[in-house]
Image (spheres, helix red, strand yellow):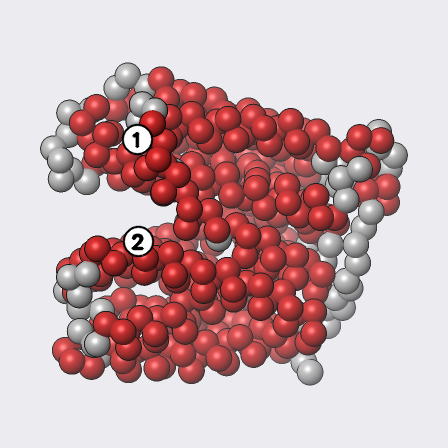
C-alpha cells in the first residue's frame, strides 16, 4: 500500500542555501507565480480568439474560412511536444534553468508570430510558441510536487486552478480591447510582455530540485523513467482518469458555441453562458481545496465521482428529452452540475498521479501532461465530430467519459486508501 505524506519542503531543505532575494519568495508568492506561469497557455490562446477576423483578412482568407483555427491547433500540437523536452531535462539540470529556457522559447514564438509575413510562417511560429508554453506548465507542476505532496499539494493545485480559470473568462474581452486600441498583432505581443515580466519575477523562485536528486539526461534514463511511470498502476489509473475528464472539457469547449448557436439559436447569450460556467468552475475548485483539507484527497475524490455520476445520469436523461433539444434552462442547469465537477477532478487526479513519483517528477509531469492533453483533445475531437444537430451526442460522450474516469478513480483510490 502506498503511504501518502503531506509536507511542505522549504527552499533550504529542497535545494540548499539561496541568496536572500530568492529566499523571500514564500508559499503565497510561489502559488501566485505558479498560477501565472500555468496561465501563460490560456493567455496565448484566449487573447488571440477575437483576432480571427483580422487574421483572415491579413492572410487573404474567406470571411468564413476555418483555416484560421490552425493558429490554435498547432499551438496545442506544440504543447504536446514541449513536455518531453523540458520535463526530463529539468530532472537533470534543475527546474529553474529549464523554466527560463522555456520562457525564452515562449517569447521567441510570440515575437515571430507578431512579425510573421505569411501564413506558413505564422503557423510555424505558433508551433514554436506552443513548445515554449508547455515548459512553464510542465515545470511548475514538477516544482509543486518537489515542495508539496498528498493533501497539501491537492489543496494548492485546486486553489491555483480556481485562480487560473479566471483567465479564459476575461482574456477574450482583453484581446478585443487590444484590437480596438492597437493593431491586431498586439494580441501576439501582449503575451510576450507578460512572459518577460514573469521571467523577471521568476528570479525570486528557488530551485526546488537538489543536486543529489538529479538524474542523467540520456535516452536510456528518460526511457527508464517513462517506463516507471507506465508501470505504476496508481499513476496510470489517475492519469487516464484525468485524460477522460479533460476529454469532457475539450468536448465542451468545442461544442458549446455550436450548441448555443445551432441547437438553441441563442448565440448572443454565448459569452454570458461561457462566463457563468467559468465562474462555476472556479467556485468548484475553491470548494475542492476546502474539502480536501477537511476529509483528505482520496476521500474527496470518491465523494466527487459519486456526485458527478448522479449528475452525469441526470444530464444524459435530460439531454435525450424532446428529440435531443431539451428546454434550454433545464439543459444549462444539468450541464452546470456535471462539467465543473469533471473539470475539478483534473488537479485532484493529477496530484494523485504525481504522488508516487517524486524522484522523477519532471519526466512524470511530461508523460502525464502529454497523455492528458493529447489524449483528451483527441477524444474530445472525436466526440464533437459526431454532432447531429442535437445535444444527444455531446451528452452521451460526456457521460461515457465520466463513467470511465469514475471507475479508474474508485479503483485506484481503493488501492491507495481503502477507508
Q: Which quarter of the figure has residue 112?
A: top left
Please identify the quadrant where the C terminus is shown: bottom right
Residue found at x 55% / y 52%: 163
Horizontal side of residue 325 vs 208, given as left or right: left
Q: Which quarter of the figure has residue 265?
A: bottom left
Label 2 sits on a secondary structure element that is helix
Residue found at x 84% / y 29%: 19
Residue 219 visible? The answer is no
- Disc 2 target residue: 271
Q: Residues within 10 Å of mark 1 (few under 14, many from 20)?
A: few
Q: Earlier in the sequence, mark 1 or mark 2?
A: 1
The residue mark sitting in front, 1 or 2, is 1
Please identify the quadrant where the N terminus is shown: bottom right
* Residue 78 position (above or below residue 235): above
The label number, if any, that marks residue 180 in the structure image: 1
Residue 252: image location, x then y, percent: 33, 60
Residue 73: image location, x then y, percent: 33, 40
Horizontal side of residue 259 vs 237, given as left or right: left
Residue 306 visible? The answer is yes
Q: Residues within 10 Å of mark 2 (few under 14, many from 20)?
A: few
Residue found at x 34% / y 75%: 334
Of residue 210 and residue 260, the one placed in the foreground of this image is: 260
Residue 370: image location, x then y, percent: 48, 47
Of residue 70 and residue 340, the one placed in the foreground of this image is: 340
Whether label 1 touches label 2, CB < 8 Å: no
Amino acid at each position: 500500500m502506498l503511504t501518502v505524506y503531506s509536507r511542505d519542503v522549504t527552499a533550504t531543505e529542497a535545494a540548499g542555501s539561496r541568496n536572500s532575494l530568492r529566499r523571500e519568495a514564500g508559499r503565497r508568492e510561489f502559488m501566485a507565480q505558479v498560477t501565472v506561469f500555468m496561465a501563460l497557455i490560456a493567455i496565448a490562446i484566449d487573447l488571440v480568439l477575437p483576432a480571427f477576423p483580422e487574421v483572415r483578412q491579413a492572410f487573404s482568407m474567406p470571411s468564413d474560412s476555418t483555416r484560421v483555427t490552425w493558429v490554435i491547433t498547432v499551438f496545442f500540437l506544440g504543447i504536446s511536444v514541449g513536455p518531453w523536452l523540458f520535463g526530463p531535462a529539468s530532472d537533470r539540470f534543475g527546474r529553474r534553468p529549464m523554466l527560463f529556457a522555456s520562457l525564452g522559447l515562449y517569447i521567441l514564438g510570440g515575437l515571430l508570430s507578431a512579425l510573421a509575413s505569411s501564413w506558413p510562417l505564422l503557423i510555424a511560429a505558433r508551433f514554436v510558441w506552443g513548445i515554449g508554453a508547455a515548459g512553464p506548465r510542465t515545470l511548475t507542476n514538477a516544482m509543486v510536487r518537489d515542495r508539496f505532496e498528498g493533501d497539501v499539494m491537492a489543496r494548492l493545485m485546486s486553489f491555483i486552478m480556481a485562480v487560473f480559470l479566471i483567465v479564459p473568462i476575461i482574456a477574450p474581452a482583453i484581446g478585443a480591447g487590444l484590437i480596438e486600441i492597437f493593431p491586431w498583432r498586439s494580441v501576439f505581443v501582449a503575451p510576450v510582455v507578460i512572459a518577460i515580466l514573469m521571467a523577471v519575477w521568476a528570479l525570486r523562485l528557488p530551485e526546488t530540485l537538489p543536486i543529489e536528486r538529479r538524474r542523467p539526461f540520456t535516452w536510456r534514463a528518460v526511457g527508464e523513467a517513462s517506463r516507471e511511470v507506465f508501470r505504476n498502476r496508481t499513476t496510470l489509473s489517475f492519469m487516464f482518469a484525468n485524460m477522460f475528464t479533460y476529454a469532457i472539457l475539450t468536448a465542451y469547449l468545442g461544442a458549446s458555441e455550436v450548441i448555443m448557436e445551432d441547437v438553441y439559436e441563442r448565440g448572443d447569450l454565448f459569452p454570458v453562458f461561457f462566463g457563468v460556467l467559468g465562474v462555476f468552475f472556479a467556485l468548484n475548485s475553491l470548494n475542492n481545496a476546502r474539502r480536501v483539507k477537511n476529509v483528505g484527497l482520496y476521500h474527496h475524490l470518491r465523494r466527487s465521482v459519486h456526485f458527478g455520476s448522479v449528475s452525469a445520469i441526470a444530464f444524459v436523461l435530460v439531454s435525450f428529452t424532446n428529440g435531443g433539444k431539451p428546454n434550454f434552462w433545464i439543459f444549462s442547469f444539468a450541464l452546470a452540475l456535471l462539467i465543473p465537477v469533471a473539470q475539478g477532478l483534473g488537479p485532484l487526479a493529477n496530484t494523485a498521479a504525481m504522488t508516487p513519483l517524486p524522484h522523477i517528477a519532471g519526466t512524470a509531469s511530461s508523460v502525464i501532461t502529454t497523455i492528458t492533453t493529447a489524449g483528451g483533445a483527441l477524444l474530445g475531437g472525436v466526440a464533437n465530430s459526431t454532432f447531429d444537430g442535437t445535444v444527444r451526442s455531446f451528452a452521451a460522450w460526456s457521460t461515457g467519459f465520466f463513467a470511465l474516469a469514475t471507475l479508474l478513480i474508485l479503483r485506484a483510490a481503493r488501492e491507495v486508501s481503502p477507508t
